[in-house]
Amino acid sequence: MPVTDVKHDLDTRTLTITAEFAASAERVWQIYADPRQLEKVWGPPTYPATVVEHDLTPGGRVNYFMTGPEGDKHAGYWKVLTVDEPRALSFEDGFAGLDFTPNPDMPVSTNLYTFTEHDGRTHVTYVTTYDTAEDLQKALEMGMVEGSSSAINQIDGFLAS
């Protein structure tokens, strides 16, 4: 499994997941840069994603929804902050209505993904920061660690296919 470590810290309001993949940084980056590839790994296996808008440029937006086992849909968005291909990507990630209007009752996180290649393998650090410790706690209670880890763990299989 590619996830090698998971830590959360209520004091800094962060959830940090580290993973390693048997692929170049450019190849791992392409998963996030291509909406059809992103759909294969964004969201847990039982909640596959559909990306309906994908503008991976600073100020751009990525709109998506995940479909649950019962056909229920859950929408979200990224507001892209920075892009340093293939080294780093940062964005705000939030919950939304099915029209992709942000849901103000749910936490918004700021995410920084960094990709570091060494000897043909890529180490990725996913750092998610919430505005408050309460928002982080809410995300943890919603299963963010399990959901994110299972989504990231799909990347190895996708890279192998």
Image (cartoon, rainbow, N blue to C red):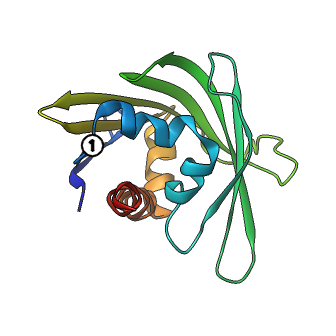
x, y percentage for residue 7? Answer: 24, 47
Residue 13 in sight from this viewpoint: no
Quadrant where the N terminus lies? bottom left
- Is 60 left, or right, of 117 in this rendering? right
- Quadrant of the drawing holding the C terminus: bottom left
Q: Secondary structure at mark 1?
A: loop
Is residue 3 found left or right of 55 in the rendered image? left
Q: Circle 1 sits on which residue? A: 23
User: Relative to 110, is 154 above or below?
Assistant: below
Q: Position of residue 80 (x, y in %)?
A: 61, 25
The relative height of residue 100 versus residue 12 in the rendered view (above or below) is below
x then y, percent, for residue 138? 50, 54
Look at 29% across and 36% down and name the residue there. 125
**Quarter of the rendering containing residue 114:** top left
- Front one among 92 and 62: 62
Q: Classify mark 1: residues with Cα within 10 Å, few (<14), some (14-19) or many (20+).
A: some
Image spot of residue 100 (x, y percent):
81, 44
* Residue pictured at 51% horizontal, 39% vertical: 32
Left or right of residue 160: residue 32: right
| Residue drawn at x 48%, y 43% as measured from the top left | 31
Asked if residue 54 can be seen in this view, the reply is yes
Report the residue that reaches farthest toward the left: 119
